[in-house]
Amino acid sequence: MDFHRVILLLLGCLPLATAMYFVLGEKEQKCIIEEIPEDTLVTGNFFLEPWDVKSFSHSPHLGVTVTVRDPNQEVQLSKRYGVFGKFTFTAHASGQHHLCFQTNSTRFSVFAGERLKLHLDVQMGEHWVDPNMDRTKDNLQILESNLQHLTSQMTYITRQQEYNREKEEIFRQISEETNSKVLWWAVIQTGILLSVGFWQIKRLQDFFIAKKLV
């Protein structure tokens, strides 16, 4: 079996289709940023393949290290996988989460110039339903599972809306504070201009009196 068939076979084993891909060098790390509400389940599937299959020199220990950092830059997940895998975590706080992927190899750094393609699919919330469920369960169990799936989706949507409202409230507060500062700065500028104007008028008046022009 050639390498192309192996890739197709492994991709077929992934439960979800890849949503994006990006290029990595060996031992190179790249991160993506996701806005994730609190208590949201995040599931990611990935597969690593060489950019150029023909010129790629195989490394038996090639894999991916997945690191997840929360909005406070604390490591929430750090695990090493093979060329493909699945990771899950639950967000403990709302905000920007950094999902970082770093390739690793046991080869010497002089050979670490290969370009690799990382396929990645990240989904949020309870989203997966077993496609073979109808073969093993009766209609009532199927309906119950579908209701649970819909409930989890509604919960995720509710959390997303609450998170968006929190962000809107923070943005509104920042806007109000900025507008207040701008208003006070305008008042101060006006006061300074009036003070300088009165001072100049007083100086001119004193000058004319001293010269007996008035």
Image (spheres, rainbow, N blue to C red):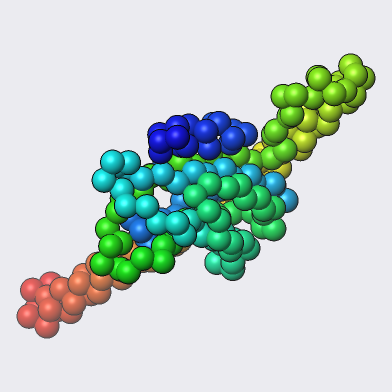
From this view, report whether residue 4 is shown above or below residue 93.
Answer: above
Q: Residue furthest top?
A: 139
Question: Left or right of 204: which side holds 139?
Answer: right
Work out whether residue 2 or residue 21 is closer to the camera in this orientation and state it.
2
From this view, report whether residue 181 is shown above or below residue 14.
Answer: below
Residue 182, x across and y down, in percent: 41, 58
Position of the N terminus, as image quadrant, is top left
Image quadrant of residue 45? Answer: top right
Question: Left or right of 98: which side holds 138?
Answer: right
Residue 179 at least partly seen: no
Residue 54 at least partly seen: yes
Q: Residue at x 66, y 50 (%)?
A: 88
Q: Residue at x 49, y 56 (%)?
A: 64
Q: Residue at x 40, y 56 (%)?
A: 59
Residue 149, x across and y down, in percent: 78, 30
From this view, report whether residue 195 is shown above or below residue 55.
Answer: below
Q: Residue at x 7, y 80 (%)?
A: 211
